Image (tube, rainbow, N blue to C red):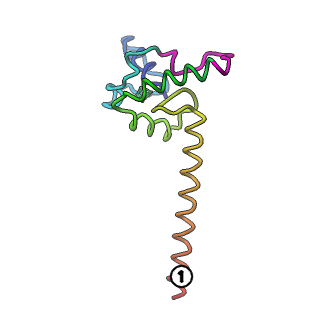
Amino acid sequence: MLHPIEARLDANRSNVPVRGGGFADDSPWHSNAACRRDEAGLFFAPSKEPTAARLSREEQAKRVCGRCPVLLECREHALLQPEPYGVWGGLTAAERRVVLARRRRREQELREAARRGAQVAAAG
Ligand code: SF4
């Protein structure tokens, strides 16, 4: 799936299929992205980026996300895909992995609680 910035760039090329099929219809959340007005390079790491440079770049990207009206939509999109690279919805790829792991744990706990509840009901 494309980052909103890349999607914008692709959309500006006439009759070029959008890579991965993403955002060809320029969905509403995507069309309001704050990053459409910023540099694409801010959101993705160049190869062999030193750690200090990465942290600084990610902070800058997050500042753009912080004033983005579609932050939640973007974040959810990146979590659901899931998007493996770049800053999306104010979260880095590593931060999204943590959120996804928490969600999986919570879902597992809910499933176990439901299973235990069903057992109690069946026994009662
Ligand atoms: S939340 Fe960040 S990455 Fe997502 S659309 Fe907005 S500015 Fe772009």
Question: Does 46 appear in magenta?
Answer: yes
What segment is highlighted magenta in the picture? 40-52
Question: Does 56 appear in magenta?
Answer: no
6 or 98, nearer to the observer = 98
Q: Residue at x 44, y 40 (%)?
A: 76
Work out which residue is located at the far bottom of the displayed protein and give it.
124
- Residue 36, located in which quarter of the rendered image? top left
14 or 69, nearer to the observer = 69
Residue 60 % position (x, y): 49, 21
Q: Along the horizontal axis of the image, is 115 left or right of 34? A: right
Residue 20 % position (x, y): 49, 27
Pointer 1: what residue? 120
39 or 116, nearer to the observer = 39
Determine whether 60 is above or below 27 in the image. Answer: above
Residue 86 % position (x, y): 55, 26
Q: Main secondary structure of the magenta part?
A: loop
- Residue 21, located in which quarter of the rendered image? top left
